[in-house]
Image (cartoon, coloured by chain):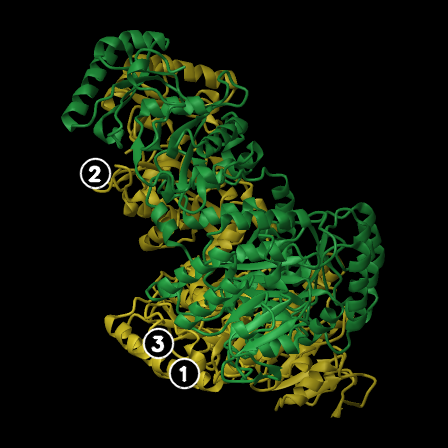
Chain colours: A green, B yellow
Amino acid sequence: MSGLGFFNNPASVAVIGASTDPEKIGGRPIRYLQEFGYAGAIYPINPHRAEVQGLPAYPQLDDLPAVPEVAIIAVSGANAVAQVVRCATLGVKGCVIMASGFGETGDEPGLGWQREMLDAAARTGMRIVGPNSQGLANFATGSVLSFSTLFTEQPPEDGAIAIVSQSGALCSVPYGLLREAGYGVRYAHATGNDIDVTAAELAAEVVSDPEVRLLLIYMEDITDLDSLAIMARKALDRGIPVIALKGGRSEAGQKAAASHTGALATEESVVDAFLEKHGIWRARSTRDLVAAVGLYLRPGIPKGERLAIVSNSGAICVLAADAAEEEGLSLSELSGTSRAELGATLPSFASVENPIDVTAALLTDSSLFGKVFPILGRDDAVDACLVGIPVAGRGYDVDRFANDIAAFEAEAGLPVVMAVPQANIAGVFRARGIVVFADESEAVHALAQYLRHHRLMAWAKTQPRTSKPDPSDGDPRIRFSAGRSVLNEFQSLRLLQNIGVPAVEHMLVLHPDEVTAAIEQLGGGPVVIKGCSSEATHKSELGLVRIGVALSDATGVVKEMFAIMNREGIASEGVIIARMVRGVHEGMLGARFDPMFGPVVVIGAGGIHVEAMPDVQLLLPPFSVDEAIRAIHRLRIAAVLGGVRGAPPVDLSAWAQAAVAVGDAMLDEELAIHELDVNPLMLLPLGGPVQPAVCAVDAVVIRGSGVPGRAAMGSGAESVLRPPR
Amino acid sequence: MSGLGFFNNPASVAVIGASTDPEKIGGRPIRYLQEFGYAGAIYPINPHRAEVQGLPAYPQLDDLPAVPEVAIIAVSGANAVAQVVRCATLGVKGCVIMASGFGETGDEPGLGWQREMLDAAARTGMRIVGPNSQGLANFATGSVLSFSTLFTEQPPEDGAIAIVSQSGALCSVPYGLLREAGYGVRYAHATGNDIDVTAAELAAEVVSDPEVRLLLIYMEDITDLDSLAIMARKALDRGIPVIALKGGRSEAGQKAAASHTGALATEESVVDAFLEKHGIWRARSTRDLVAAVGLYLRPGIPKGERLAIVSNSGAICVLAADAAEEEGLSLSELSGTSRAELGATLPSFASVENPIDVTAALLTDSSLFGKVFPILGRDDAVDACLVGIPVAGRGYDVDRFANDIAAFEAEAGLPVVMAVPQANIAGVFRARGIVVFADESEAVHALAQYLRHHRLMAWAKTQPRTSKPDPSDGDPRIRFSAGRSVLNEFQSLRLLQNIGVPAVEHMLVLHPDEVTAAIEQLGGGPVVIKGCSSEATHKSELGLVRIGVALSDATGVVKEMFAIMNREGIASEGVIIARMVRGVHEGMLGARFDPMFGPVVVIGAGGIHVEAMPDVQLLLPPFSVDEAIRAIHRLRIAAVLGGVRGAPPVDLSAWAQAAVAVGDAMLDEELAIHELDVNPLMLLPLGGPVQPAVCAVDAVVIRGSGVPGRAAMGSGAESVLRPPR
């Protein structure tokens, strides 16, 4: 991650394939470097020209007076490969390969060329950006190693925003939108195929720039999780908000969804969980990526999320309040003092409650805003303001409004957004540095993103840092790819107990003669009786589950189950006799290995409809009990867990602890858990007789087949007639 | 509704309170009428001037050479009242009262003035728009009886769009946004307090204008449902889409939510149901109100909702496909022919699947769009197109792109939207009449609204027209306001059976001696036993519900229930003995009277968590079985109703028929049902032994207390030991 600084501002740049035409790929970087004030050495390389765009040109790399720090490769195909190899040999630190036609084709010779370049670079430690890269741009120093046409369409201006994108277009689009809106952009990096240096790695580099205050990142796929996590942590430590836009659903995610619990945990929801865990806001569109930028660049951090709304239109007050509620922002409850002061200031027919409708009186009394805002600024209940001016123009003292609002924003230090549909009027406010949107819903949406993102960042800072697996152990994400072995229910329950997830009290019997003794050891019937076989995946459908069996009937039922397993030709590994446990509610707890993200824990409502009507949240281990409780609170079922309709509240903390235990177990290489599914996990009353107040009554665990599981698992036989702990 | 044409284009207009200052409320209409080409007579009335803005002025109404058809009242308070009374007396057809300070203050004297004006108008049949009205504008004729300042900020141009708003600001904002975007607007009506003529009534008038092709309506409260329904039907008949924005939550809705089932059916969801039933699209913001206007104005109606995406950026292809999926649009599956033709046209590395990435080759081959779009136009699978051009400018033949896309749109007759972030580039496409948005998500959002609104309109046209209650019966919405009487469970189940909702087979016993005979009549135990009292609202909590009671235990249980009712001091109206019925799933069916909308039927998932985790849809009677099935399909529980995890599918049609029966019963004055709650309604297997395959096992009905209920209800006593049918 560090050590890529030379890409951001190389001491010297060679342009291989330098063109005299400043509109060509090999010409544009030379033009930009000169035009935007790059102070280092520029070496155009062109075997047919002595001079390129006013600079002396060199026939080939070896002719250069010095080894360039970075080389732009603007030639293609086999020639590009040869040039990259030569760069590596000469000791160039990094190459930016602009040509396409490599790995993205999915075909030879592109793939082979790509391997060849990587090999050459690896030999000398040279780093590669691209291929298929639009290039890197740093407008602080004029180090613009890019052929983006947008830099001529929208002339650059240095600023506090960094853009890092895997796609050239999705680098140019936010750059263009931000510049059109007047914001300065420092970095506009478009990396391309990411065969070596990834967008996340470059992003980790740019957030080290002390003048960067906001990072926008576009990713087509999320592969370099380590760099992304490191970048996110660095950004959090420095207070730099990171907004990410990710396009597309990956094939890997679709494959993962085919497994049982995995069908709930789609690739995209794992991405959501990963980004959230790292304090990164996920944008849903290019608009989302840039819409709130003006707020992010304001000094300070928001103190809360309570909104005061002020407008000269009652209708806009109503619509803005509607929008605030939809976005989860609450309205400030103004103090008695504030209301009295507003009452003394506003006309009698105006509202002194929030939203504050200053009415059309604004037309005749231009001083109203100057009087109203200081009152709001003194009220502790006001964390942010929305000002809606749907109608203005001739007759309105818009300049004064703008001065009053800008002064308030500076003095009170609160975020202010405006909703102003008239473009010319909006311009007056923007000129004073106020963040203006065309309508109230956009203004509230952007404000909510800004406020909630800061809350997310504050929360993410308190979370445990992801522990890094020791690279010598190999990549845990692929360690089970060789095969899997399914544990039967008895083995699964036992493993759960060993990792700290409470399971129902139960016995395994291998013969009907043992049934009576087993039930007596459990304290008598009625009991639950289940056939135990690692080969029976749908026990209920086979008649291998019987609930509420009396002692007198139990032996007969057990005989029947052995007969069923025989008849169905599935391994008969005994019959489980378990206590009857009924929870106040049924939860579920699952885990699996995502091919990209590694272990993923799923927590949600349990029961038979968990797939048809999923109500689940994902957690990426390691996570804390608090984090698990936060996830539980986002479930739909959360509405009843606190106790409704005479039911007692359940113990969320016990559930969360069980989830943490599963998360930790997924990180434990010794346990080699590939997949785990507890459904139902009975949720028991908070403070009730059973502690901890959760109980797994059914479970399936799948382990990596190559791993004997020496730590937590014994054979079934040795546990016969003995409760598993 | 009809008969308000004079407000849209009066033959003559008096302006009472005429001002020489064209910026004043009493001056601006005179200026606008003259400036915008009004051809009728304008009579300024001003006792102090002989001439106003170049027109002869008159001291008072009585001095006019003729009775004006419409009068603008630009004076305030008691004077306004006097002028309105005089207008009525003279035979003026309608007044537009611009002054505020009337009913909206909630106080006297404003309220009294309002009543006085209404009385005077009623005596002569004069109609009143306002007070607190910004006024009415018709740019086809220049009849601009409005003081909106926006008409000077954004000069008007006649067009096919009508705006009708209760709020002045929310008339001016869409007017301004549309004019800024270059769309013509014919009507810009802002009605104000709506004490007589309502926004809905005026809207019904403007949709009669044969040149209006789109209506935007803003409402702060929805009161005039009849006019709204009539307007919506007229608009549907004429194929005019209506987009409504409604601000705020009404107090009436909050009050209604306090009742049991009502807590689910919030005011806002009733509004949603009402608008949807009438084919009106509900916008959520001012942006939503205007964003898709360009699509609505295109000729023809969409043939489907399958989208083809074309871009010169792969990333935009991906993001647009993501957005389409989120908005519920599917991507066109191109035919083999199309793919072959695309393959022959596009560079080898481009995609011939949808989304179609024409790649950066667009820069070198400006003819690409002209070749690609005709292929899409010939493919039946393509119903609409999105074209994303994230980067263009120097080097790109944008004019040619625009010509090619405009030609395709005209020839293929398909809706096309573009996503073009660069404002100057977007302008080139807009100039060709193409609908352009700044980003792919906005483009897809607007397209989805346009396509889905047309589907809604087509569906709404097939729905039964709301039957109008006979006015001589009084308003059904208030007929039960005097009081309510709660039926006990026996009476409630009996009423359900009488209106056609299948209920569990059951008996009412008044003495423990009758229990055995009752159970034998039901075919033996086990049975469900429930205390029957109209005063017991939480039977389970009181121990008045016992499930699975054997014949041998039943008499004892019944004795206990009588004892409980005695002890609790609640009316003991017998004990119900019912068959055990277990559904595949539990549904619910409810109904209530909304203070504004009248009868509302609630259909949803049943069980004890219906309030904490509501999964409900609303239906406004009368509705069809199809409409009820459509509502069921929108429930979350719909995912399991077709049969999952070995459960059989349930009979949706039986459930929908029960809902229709409840809806019809709610419209039946004789039945006088105020509120009805069936939970659970057991959902039984489709094609199973029980027909119809739903069964109400618990119910509470509340009736209007003044109504004896002669049609459907008997006393409990006469039914003892007799099943209720």
Residue type for callout 2: Gly
Q: Is residue B621 visible?
A: yes
Tell me, yes or no, whether the two marked residues, 3 and 2, touch with CB atoms within 8 Å: no
Q: Position of residue B400 (x, y in %)?
A: 45, 86
Q: Height in image: A309 above or below A390? A: above
Front of the two marks 2 and 1: 1
Q: Is residue B166 left or right of residue A517?
A: right
- The circle on residue B688 is 2
Which tag, 3 or 2, sits closer to the chain's start?
3
- Residue at 35 percent of width and 63 percent of height: A106
Q: Chain of mark 2?
A: B
Closest to the observer: B58 or A609? A609
| Kind of element beneath mark 2 | loop
Query: Relative to A316, does residue B405 appear above or below in the rendering?
Result: below
Q: Are marks 2 and 1 on the same chain?
A: yes
Mark 2 or mark 1, which has the lower sequence index? 1
Residues A718 and B59: in front is A718
Residue linked to disc 3: B347
Residue A366 in the image: above or below residue B615? below
User: Disc 1 residue type?
Assistant: Asp
Q: Which mark is residue B365?
A: 1
Same chain under badges 1 and 3? The reply is yes
Q: Amino acid at mark 3?
A: Pro
Q: Residue at left 26%, top 10%? A: A515
Residue B477 shows which numbered tag? none
